[in-house]
Image: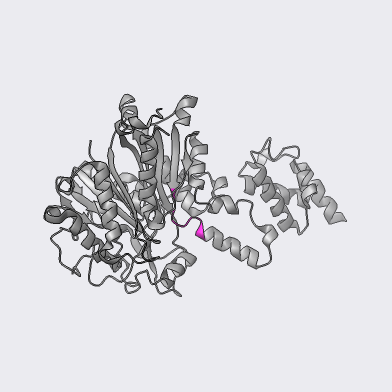
């Protein structure tokens, strides 16, 4: 697993208080990990802070799963 | 549920559940036993370094295992939810959960859920949360502000969280009257039940303003004790000549109020009845009461009228008694209120042991009054070594007293000139 994926996973575990084994790439923050809409706002902020990236609101709305988050951040970092 | 106003008189309101989080302990029995044993909950401030401030003592809720009367937050609020709530909500949840579990009330039908409401207030709300959020914004990180900042700081959010946790869909309300909040919450919730808006109400107050901003603010208002930083246990000394301000405390007191027939029908344990409630305003000054505390006199008189009793029926008074200059003004008002019966009443200030819990004080003290009735014990006023002024009223100096207590009066007064009195009775 990439360093980014690892870090994303850690942030999700910490913010949503879920077991690490549940944080699979396809896990949806809301449907599978018990987040509500405010939790997802906070998660995106945590990603921005941890990876020093800007995630605009329209992009944030499309980040629904762990994989979505990893892909977006990897793309930003590669650019 | 009834909505007929003419039926109001027939709807009596009793207390069927209690929850306490105080500087003495977490838990009703633990707090009460330590109180009547003459223990203190006051010490040097530990949650931040108070060295820069003139007031350095407070009543903080002790950490520790729940079974030993300590606070283990994870027992009350899931770890992942803790950061979404200011500490005043944490403490409020701990007291509310105790009260609801103690009452045994579990609404099963939609009608029962809709007849169960919540009215929990706070004097100040999420002060530390607001302070920290301000620092985030001031450091240019406004866009990083937590989405939970506002719901973490809002005063009515304990009522919200309690309703969500238990599915209580009745009136969802919150009282905010500074240091009178706890009494207003219980009194107003009682009236909602009397009026038929609910059959059961979870009511009380919570406060967690022992933080640098809270202590600094009340220090600037010259309201806090500053002469006992090296002997914290002596700092709260209501009516004593050496008193020099109040000691801030944190915590929460929450009761389950229930319509009497409703409680009886389900065989609930009943602590006592709320028989009187009176309110008044000083219209005088933002922080100081008027001469003779005539606003307090009027609140007590209004409570007496609503109870339909006479002062001679009252056995115990839990005073507002904050350990400030205003103590003697309250004493004036209480002496005037009782007249010739003053010599047979006992009055104490439990703030001598807990400190002043601001928005939680009134509900915590209403519960202490109920327990005084249950056990026929008047809790002590600690540190009353040399009364600044003599009185025929027994102020229960130093040690608890065993005495017959059937009816008790509890006073709370707040900044802004707001006064509230509650009268409770054994059943």
**What is the chief secondary structure element of the magenta stretch?**
loop
Q: Find residue B397 and report its horizontal and vertical position in percent.
A: 18, 60
Quadrant of the image containing the N terminus of chain B: top left
Q: Which residues are magenta?
A: B121-127
Horizontal arrangement in the rendering, residue B210 relative to residue B341 (left or right): right
Residue B203 position by quadrant = top left
Q: Nearer the viewer, residue A30 or B315?
A: B315
What residue appears at the point 46 percent right and 75 percent down from the top-left corner?
B52
Q: Is residue B142 visible?
A: yes
Quadrant of the image containing the C terminus of chain B: top left
- Number of marks in picture: 0
Residue B331 position by quadrant = bottom left
Q: Which residue is situated farthest in the right direction here?
A: A79
Q: Nearer the viewer, residue B384 or B298?
A: B298
Q: Find residue B180 and report its horizontal and vertical position in percent.
A: 37, 54
Q: Find residue B393 and report its horizontal and vertical position in percent.
A: 15, 58
Q: In the rendered image of this protein, does residue B216 appear above or below residue B90?
A: below
What residue appears at the point 27 percent right and 47 percent down from the top-left corner?
B303
Q: Nearer the viewer, residue A57 or A3?
A: A57
Q: Is residue A1 visible?
A: no
The way the protein has been coloured in the rendering is: one colour
Q: Find residue B56 and report its horizontal and vertical position in percent.
A: 39, 70
Q: In the rendered image of this protein, does residue B16 appear above or below residue B108?
A: below
What residue appears at the point 46 percent right and 70 percent down from the top-left corner?
B216
What residue appears at the point 37 percent right and 69 percent down from the top-left corner?
B223
């Amino acid at each position: 697993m990439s360093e980014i994926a690892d870090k994303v996973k850690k942030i999700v575990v910490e913010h949503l208080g879920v077991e690490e084994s549940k944080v699979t790439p396809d896990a949806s923050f809301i449907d599978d990990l018990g987040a509500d809409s405010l939790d997802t706002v906070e998660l995106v902020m945590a990603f921005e802070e941890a990876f020093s990236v800007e995630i605009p609101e329209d992009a944030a709305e499309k980040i629904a799963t762990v994989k979505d988050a990893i892909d977006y951040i990897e793309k930003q970092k590669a650019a | 549920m009834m909505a007929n106003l003419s039926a109001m008189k027939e709807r009596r309101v009793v207390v069927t559940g209690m929850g306490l989080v105080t500087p003495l302990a977490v838990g009703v029995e633990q707090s009460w036993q330590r109180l009547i044993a003459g223990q203190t909950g006051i010490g040097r401030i530990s949650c931040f370094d108070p060295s820069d401030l003139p007031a350095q003592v407070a009543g903080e809720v002790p950490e520790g295992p729940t079974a030993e009367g300590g606070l283990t937050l994870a027992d009350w609020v899931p770890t992942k939810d803790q950061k979404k709530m200011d500490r005043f909500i944490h403490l409020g949840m701990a007291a509310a959960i105790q009260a609801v579990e103690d009452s045994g009330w579990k609404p099963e039908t939609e009608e029962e859920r809709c007849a169960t409401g919540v009215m929990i207030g706070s004097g100040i709300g999420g002060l530390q949360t607001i302070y920290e959020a301000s620092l985030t914004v001031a450091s240019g990180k406004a866009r990083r502000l937590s989405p939970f900042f506002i719901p973490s700081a809002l005063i009515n959010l304990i009522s919200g969280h309690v309703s969500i946790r238990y599915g209580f869909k009745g009136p969802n309300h919150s009282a905010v009257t500074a240091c009178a909040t706890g009494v207003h919450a219980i009194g107003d919730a009682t009236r909602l039940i009397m009026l038929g808006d609910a059959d059961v109400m979870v009511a009380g107050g919570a406060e967690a303003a022992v933080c640098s901003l809270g202590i600094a603010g009340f220090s600037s208002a010259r309201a806090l004790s500053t002469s006992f930083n090296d002997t914290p246990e002596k700092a709260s000394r209501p009516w004593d000549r050496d008193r020099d301000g109040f000691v801030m405390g944190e915590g929460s007191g929450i009761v389950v109020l229930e319509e009497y027939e409703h409680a009886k029908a389900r065989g609930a344990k009943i602590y006592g009845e709320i028989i009187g409630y009176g309110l008044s305003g000083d219209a005088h000054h933002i922080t100081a009461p008027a001469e003779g505390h005539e606003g307090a006199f009027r609140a007590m008189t209004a409570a007496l009228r609503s109870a339909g009793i006479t002062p001679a029926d009252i056995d115990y008074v839990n005073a507002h008694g904050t350990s400030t200059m205003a103590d003697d003004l309250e004493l004036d008002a209480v002496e005037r209120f009782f007249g010739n019966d003053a010599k047979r009443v006992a009055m104490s200030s439990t703030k001598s042991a807990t400190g002043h819990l601001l928005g939680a004080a009134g509900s915590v003290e209403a519960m202490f009054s109920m327990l005084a009735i249950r056990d026929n014990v008047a809790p002590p006023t600690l540190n009353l070594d040399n009364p600044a002024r003599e009185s025929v009223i027994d102020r229960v100096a130093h040690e608890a007293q065993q005495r017959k207590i059937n009816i008790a009066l509890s006073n709370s007064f707040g900044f802004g000139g707001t006064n509230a009195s509650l009268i409770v009775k054994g059943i």
